Amino acid sequence: MAEYMIRVRDESLDDLSLAERVEFFTLRLQEGVQSMAGAELVAVDGVAVEG
């Protein structure tokens, strides 16, 4: 599975921990969601979440 950098612009995710954010977006990616409001996905070698 490809890994992604996730830049979070949705303030509703601010209360989530790093692990919870990664899990949230990983589940969306596994579901095949291509566009997600409040987030920009950039293909990289590792997973990172920027608030």
Image: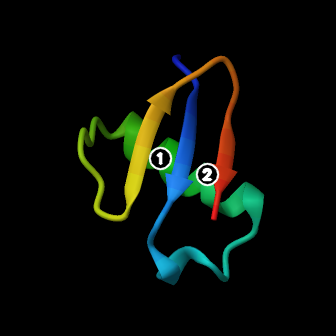
What amino acid is found at the position of numbered circle 1 in the picture?
Answer: Leu
**Residue labelled with disc 2:** 23
Q: Disc 1 on helix, strand or loop?
A: helix
Disc 1 packing (10 Å; few <14; some 14–19; many ≥20): few
Query: At 41% across and 35% down in the image, what residue appears?
Result: 30
The relative height of residue 8 versus residue 1 in the rendered view (above or below) is: below
The relative height of residue 5 versus residue 24 in the rendered view (above or below) is: above
Q: Is residue 32 left or right of residue 44?
A: left
Is the C-beta separation of discs 1 and 2 under 8 Å? yes
**Residue labelled with disc 1:** 27
What amino acid is found at the position of numbered circle 2 in the picture?
Answer: Glu
The relative height of residue 19 versus residue 5 in the rendered view (above or below) is: below
Q: Residue 10's spot in the image, x, y percent?
A: 44, 73
Query: At 66% across and 17% down in the image, what residue appears?
Result: 45
Q: Residue 6's spot in the image, x, y percent?
A: 54, 45
15 or 9: nearer the eye? Answer: 9
